[in-house]
Image: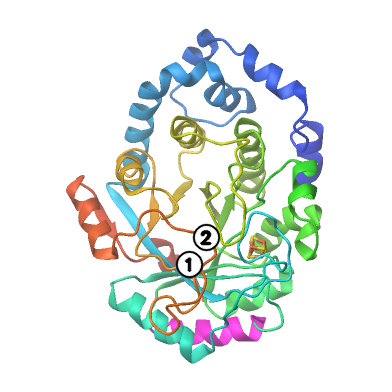
Amino acid sequence: MQGIQEILSDAQLDSQGPMWLGKLDDITEEQVVTHLSDLSYKYSPDRFAALVSPAAEGYLEQMAQQAKQLTIQRFGRTIQLYAPLYVSSYCVNNCNYCGYNAGNDYQRTRLSIDEAMADAEVIADEGFRHILLVSGEDKEFVTVDYLCALAGKLRNRFSSISVEIYSMSTGEYAELFKAGIDGVTLYQETYDRQTYRKNHLKGPKSDYDYRIETHDRTASAGMRRIGLGVLLGLANWRIEALAMAEHANYLMKRYWRSGVSFSFPRLRPALNVSDRQENIVIDKQFVQMMLALRLCFADAGIVLSTRERASLRDELVKICVTRISAGSKTNPGGYCTRTESAGQFEIDDDRTAAQVASMIKSVGAEPVWKDWDAGFCSC
Ligand code: SF4
């Protein structure tokens, strides 16, 4: 089987040349209708391209109806809740859209295990049983030993622990898995090599190939949950979506034991980072991307963070989203120990976890605080 780099290169999805833009523009409404009448909900590059094409923009209502039914069928009327726990704002990379980038001069924070546990207690007291450990690339401090020791303590309070940290080796992921961490989220940020180069100037993350193979390593290490994502706002969203769909299809075929989920962070204002105006993804396009993914990947998780505003999140939990964060703090110690530390980016939905849970109930769904996959984890 071909590796993901070859697949993307053969399909010209690792470079945003004019070919795909022309191809997407040539898709007709008739083709969209044909794909929407196919209720097998199977992925094919042609079907997905039709659903993210400009021609599908007039069919969002129909897509939303199908996506809603499909989500209820596969996931029930439930929304999983999770909370991020930032453990370090140190980072050796220079991603030029992020407040944590190494060139940014500000007071950084690292949490000791005890401090991290104090924040985790606040999160657990709010009801969460699914926690996501987040950090900049701070290998000196956020070591495998640190993460395993923290996971060992968190297991008493949380049924599911995931990480969103730097890219690791298979052996390192295997150690995390043994310690009780069963999910890894890692965003490719952009699948376009040129855009990737421009935005990741220095540091280990500048290696596109090592990063794109991360999910192979996490799945090989046994991780049950694999999170994919692109940072919307860096390049053309339709071509990014096509690449991410190919990536997901590849992972699902190759590592069928691991569940795949999608995240779509949009660029947000961050400390000392200038706003960008090119490649802005408006709400309508953002929703189209999610609907297209649901209609081609019926069993995939769709994750929405507090980067998005409350009113949009409230609508999307009715249609296709399966997991959301709530009451999030994006600064290490933000829940109790270091409330003044700097955050990675500004959040938009600042409601408490209880308020978000009550919103979920008000739309006829059940908030699930615990990740149901944890029961299948042998660790
Ligand atoms: S996006 Fe991640 S790796 Fe890049 S600078 Fe921010 S924290 Fe570091």
Q: CA distance from mark 2 to mark 1?
A: 7 Å
Image quarter for residue 147? bottom right
Give the image location of residue 185, x and y in percent: 57, 60
Q: Amino acid at mark 2?
A: Phe
**What is the span of residues highlighted in magenta in the rendered image?**
142-156
Residue at image coords 66%, 81%: 144
Residue 198 vertical position relative to residue 94 in the rendered view, above or below: above
Give the image location of residue 202, x and y in percent: 80, 62
Q: Is residue 113 magenta?
A: no
Taking 351 as reference, is 132 left or right? right
Residue 56 vertical position relative to residue 286 in the rendered view, above or below: above
Give the image location of residue 304, x and y in percent: 43, 50
User: How many numbered circles does the render carry?
Assistant: 2
Q: Whereabouts is ligand 1, in terms of quadrant?
A: bottom right
Q: Is residue 2 visible?
A: no
Local SS, label 1: loop
Q: Around disc 1, counting alpha carbons within 10 Å, would you say few (fewer than 14), some (14 to 19), or many (20 or more)?
A: many
Residue at image coords 76%, 21%: 19
Local SS, label 2: loop
Residue at image coords 56%, 55%: 227
Q: Amino acid at mark 1?
A: Thr
Q: Around disc 2, counting alpha carbons within 10 Å, would you say few (fewer than 14), some (14 to 19), or many (20 or more)?
A: many
Q: Are marks 2 and 1 in contact (CB under 8 Å)?
A: yes
Furthest residue in direction bottom, as rendered: 114
Residue 178 vertical position relative to residue 12 in the rendered view, above or below: below
Q: Is residue 155 magenta?
A: yes
Dot 2 corresponds to which residue? 345
Q: Which image quadrant: the N terminus?
A: top right
